[in-house]
């Protein structure tokens, strides 16, 4: 039923009932009005208004639901839809809104995929240049310093050794940077090795205890999926170091029927306010990129658990 007829029918029911009561119920209104009659009339009016309000609320409920969804909908949590049954403008508006969400979710997914791929390509390029240019020059400096130190008089040797040490540390820093920008091990040795080296680096740098639980029979994953799993683990660990105030972290990679599940669990203070910054939204975007889902929940006891479920296409028999 259209909104117009719905509201009209609601009012017709209320007014019709009132008129029928006036016509057939044994009531008379004197002039001037008597107190009992006035009480009955005012009572009747109140009943009519309440009934009208209740019926209107019922009739407009779908619009209320629509407004609520419009204000809260989040394109990073796709699939929120309203039921739209029957005909009439309201159902039509809801159906149009659902279709618009569908389109926006699709556009959001493709544009963020494009942005993320461009970002990865740029990181790759910077990593390559750091490795090939800066890394090579520093290695050359290191060798030059070593040769100079070998030939130098004892007074100078000490200083040259110091310079050598500083250069070596900087070179390590550049290598670490390159690894962070482009997890080369991911291409060469696969996800498990990349995550192992990520967690080892993390443990040495933060002093936190890190446990790894990787299933042995992990299926082969697409390169994008591996990169997304890696980046989500990376951001989750960074968040643990920055916000959690934790003692230990567990990074697990498990294999279910047709999905791979990454969980990063800490025993820290837990997420208090549901404020999602660029980090968490970035993880959600990456999850969408591979059709996966990301959940951030309190861990058993204290702390936080970040869980990414990525589906794995079934092997063709
Ligand atoms: N493991 C965690 N334990 C406790 N609080 C957390 C944890 N992870 C995230 N948070 C909270 O959630 C907020 C949002 O995290 P998010 O990664 O989106 O942003 P951020 O880390 O503050 O900034 P960035 O954009 O640089 O990542 C954090 O500011 C922090 O308060
Ligand atoms: Mg963060």
Image: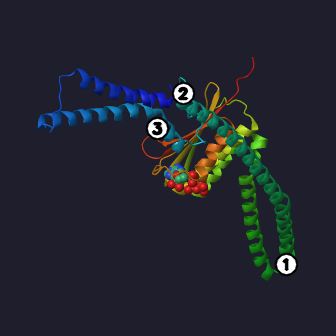
Residue in the foreground of this view, choosing between 237 and 198: 237
Residue in the foreground of this view, choosing between 239 and 287: 287
* Residue drawn at 51 percent across, 28 percent down: 2
Q: Position of residue 228 (x, y in %)?
A: 68, 42
Q: Position of residue 32 (x, y in %)?
A: 14, 39
* Residue drawn at 79 percent across, 77 percent down: 157
Mark 3: few, some, or many residues within 10 Å (few <14, many ≥20)? few
Q: Is mark 1 within 8 Å of ligand 1?
A: no
Query: Which residue carries the number 3 mark?
Result: 64
Query: Residue 58, located in which quarter of the rendered image?
Result: top left
Query: Residue 29, located in which quarter of the rendered image?
Result: top left
Secondary structure, mark 3, is helix
Query: Which residue carries the number 2 mark?
Result: 88
Secondary structure, mark 1, is loop
- The answer to whether marks 3 and 2 mark residues whose Cβ atoms lie closer than 8 Å is no
Q: CA distance from mark 3 to mark 2?
A: 16 Å
Say the numbered circle drawn on residue 152: 1
Dividing the image into 4 quarters, which one contains the C terminus? top right
Q: Position of residue 232 (x, y in %)?
A: 63, 45
- The answer to whether marks 1 and 3 mark residues whose Cβ atoms lie closer than 8 Å is no
């Amino acid at each position: 039923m259209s909104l117009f007829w719905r509201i009209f029918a609601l009012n017709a029911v209320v007014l019709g009932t009132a008129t029928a009561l006036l016509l057939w119920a044994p009531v008379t209104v004197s002039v001037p009005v008597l107190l009992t009659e006035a009480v009955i009339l005012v009572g009747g009016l109140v009943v009519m208004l309440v009934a009208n309000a209740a019926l209107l609320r019922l009739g407009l409920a779908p619009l209320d639901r629509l407004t609520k969804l419009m204000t809260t909908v989040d394109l990073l949590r796709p699939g929120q839809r309203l039921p739209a049954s029957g005909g009439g403008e309201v159902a039509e508006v809801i159906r149009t809104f659902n279709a618009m969400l569908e389109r926006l979710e699709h556009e959001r997914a493709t544009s963020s995929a494009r942005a993320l791929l461009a970002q990865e390509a740029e990181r790759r390029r910077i990593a390559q240049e750091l490795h090939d240019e800066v890394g090579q020059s520093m290695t050359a400096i290191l060798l030059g310093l070593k040769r100079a130190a070998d030939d130098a008089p004892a007074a100078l040797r000490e200083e040259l050794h110091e310079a050598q040490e500083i250069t070596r540390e900087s070179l390590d820093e550049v290598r670490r940077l390159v690894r962070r920008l482009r997890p080369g091990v991911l291409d060469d040795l696969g996800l498990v090795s990349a995550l192992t080296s990520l967690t080892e680096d993390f443990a040495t740098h933060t002093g936190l205890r890190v446990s790894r639980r990787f299933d042995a029979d992990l299926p082969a994953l697409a390169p994008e999926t591996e990169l997304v799993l890696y980046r989500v683990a990376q951001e989750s660990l960074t968040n643990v170091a920055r916000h959690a105030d934790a003692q230990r972290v567990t990074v697990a990679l498990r294999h279910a029927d047709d999905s791979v599940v990454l969980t990063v669990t800490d025993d820290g203070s837990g997420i208090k306010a549901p404020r999602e910054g660029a980090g968490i939204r970035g993880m959600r975007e990456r999850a969408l990129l591979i059709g996966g889902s990301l959940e951030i929940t309190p861990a058993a006891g204290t702390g936080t658990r970040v869980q990414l479920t990525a589906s794995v296409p079934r092997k063709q028999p």
